[in-house]
Image (spheres, rainbow, N blue to C red):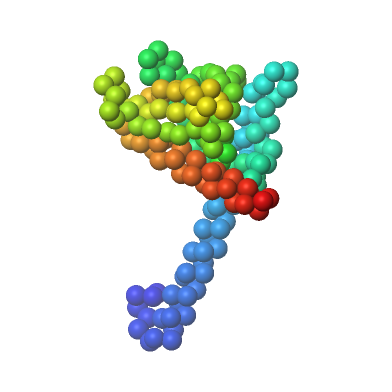
Amino acid sequence: IVTHTHHQPERSQLESAIAEVERVLDAINETIRDQEGQDRLREISQTLWLGHGRLDLTQPTRFMGPRKLLKEGPVWKTKSGRKLQCFLCSDILILTQESGQSLYRMPIPLSEMQVRDGTGKREFTDLDFRLVLAYPRGGDVINLRGSSPRDARNWIIAIERAHNKCVSAERRAASVYR
């Protein structure tokens, strides 16, 4: 309709209406994605145990409001080839055994880790990435492999973005409480 509307006031109104509809649809889609993420976090929480209790991933974050599931999928340990399931949330990264029912490691706060690609390391390929944990977490490195170079790159980008948002939220919260 817009392409065939040449009269300026009508064309402007149509373009404005289209922009508003797109904004509403984007908001609806975002709400649906958030709800699906919450449902998935609830589902994951049903099977994950931490000591004698369940790990409740639906609890809010310390500084970022409700926890969101940003990305999930299989990754492999670089050396052993062991398959793990990785869950990237807005404030933590969770590695579980392949079944997704038991933790491979305690949840890792994003503010206490960084992600690196495998460049500069002879034994690494473009499938590999590294989680570098800060000293409060023991100063450890977890070497992981994606299913493809693109998958590895997507993990790196997603973890970097989530890390930056998490650190920024913690800094804002710290400045408020000073």
Residue 3 placement: quadrant? bottom left
Q: Residue furthest right?
A: 52
- In which quadrant of the rendered image does the N terminus lie? bottom left
Residue 95 horizontal side relative to residue 77, left or right: right
Q: Nearer the viewer, residue 10 or 19?
A: 19
Residue 61 horizontal side relative to residue 20, left or right: right
Q: Nearer the viewer, residue 171 or 91?
A: 171
Q: Is residue 171 above or below residue 91?
A: below
Residue shown at the point (41%, 81%) measured from the top left = 11
Residue 33 is situated, as x and y percent measured from the top left of the image, at 56, 47
Residue 10 is situated, as x and y percent measured from the top left of the image, at 44, 84
Residue shown at the point (42%, 33%) measured from the top left = 115
Residue 89 is situated, as x and y percent measured from the top left of the image, at 55, 37
Q: Residue furthest front?
A: 178
Q: Is residue 157 above or below residue 118?
A: below
Residue 96 is situated, as x and y percent measured from the top left of the image, at 54, 22
Residue 132 placement: quadrant? top left
